Amino acid sequence: MTRYALPDLNTLPADIQAKILEVQEKSGFIPNVFLALARRPAEWRAFFAYHDALMVPETVGRSSHLSKGDREMIVTATSAANHCLYCVVAHGALLRIYEKKPLVADQVAVNHRKADITTRQRVMLDFALKVCERSHEIDDADFTALAAHGFDDEDAWDIAAITAFFGLSNRVANATGMLPNPEFYTLGRLPRPSASP
C-alpha cells in the first residue's frame, strides 16, 4: 500500500484516532491516506485542518459558489494532470457520489473538455488546470472568464488553493507509493440498493 509502514491505529494520539474512527464509521473503511499520514501526527493535523478548510468550507463559516461536487471535480482533474492514482481514484469516487453521475470522474480525469459537465464547470477546470500546470501564466483574463460564469475572486482563490493543496497531496502520495483502497473503485458507479420496507 505504501513505501512506509502504517502506524497501528491504537498507538496514535487520541484526537487522530477519533477522527479516523469517525471516517471509518461514515464510509465503512479507513481511507489509506488517513493512516499513511498519521505516522507524523503534527503533519496529519495540519494537512487535515487545511483539507477541511478547503473541502468543507461550512466548517470555517464562509459561503462559496463551489459545490462539493465542484471541489471534487477540481481535485480529480488536477490529480490526473499530476498522475496521482490515489487522488484520482479516491476523489473520483466522491465526485461520482456528489454529482450522481457514474461516468463523470473518468471523463474529467481523461479530458474535461469532453466530459458531461456544465460550461461553468469546464471554465472552472480550465482555470484549475492552468494553476496546476502553468500558474506563472495566470492573468486578468483568467479572472474575467471565471466572472463571466458566476465565480468571484474568492471562488478563484478557492479553485487555486484546492489545486495547490492537492498538488502537495499528489506528490506525497506518489512519492510514498500510496495506493487507493479497493472500495473507492466501485463507489458511486452503481445506484445504491434501496432499503427494504
Image (spheres, rainbow, N blue to C red):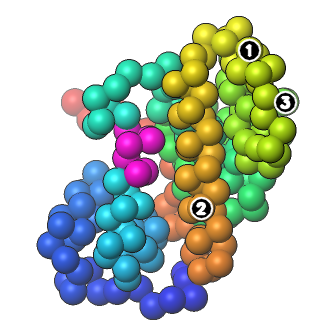
* Residue nearest the observer in this picture, 53 or 121: 53
Q: Residue furthest left?
A: 14
Residue on which disc 2 sits: 168
Indicate whether residue 66 is drawn in magenta.
no
Task: Indicate the position of residue 101 as horizontal and vertical percent values.
Answer: 60, 31
- Mark 2 or mark 3, which is nearer to you? 2
Looking at the rendered structure, the secondary structure element under dot 2 is helix
Looking at the rendered structure, the secondary structure element under dot 3 is helix
What residue type is disc 1 on? Thr
- Quarter-of-image position of residue 36: bottom left
Residue on which disc 1 sits: 144
- Mark 1 or mark 3, which is nearer to you? 1
Task: Indicate the position of residue 32 as horizontal and vertical percent values.
Answer: 45, 70
Q: Is residue 105 rendered to the left or right of residue 54? A: right
Q: Is residue 191 visible?
A: no
Residue on which disc 3 sits: 114
- Which of marks 3 and 1 precedes in the sequence? 3
The image quadrant where one finds the N terminus is bottom right
Q: Is residue 53 rendered to the left or right of residue 97? A: left
Range covered by the magenta-colored residues = 50-56
Q: Residues within 10 Å of mark 3 (few under 14, many from 20)?
A: few
**Main secondary structure type of the part rendered in magenta:** helix
What residue type is disc 3 on? Lys
Task: Indicate the position of residue 105 as horizontal and vertical percent values.
Answer: 66, 42
Q: Is residue 88 above or below residue 56?
A: below
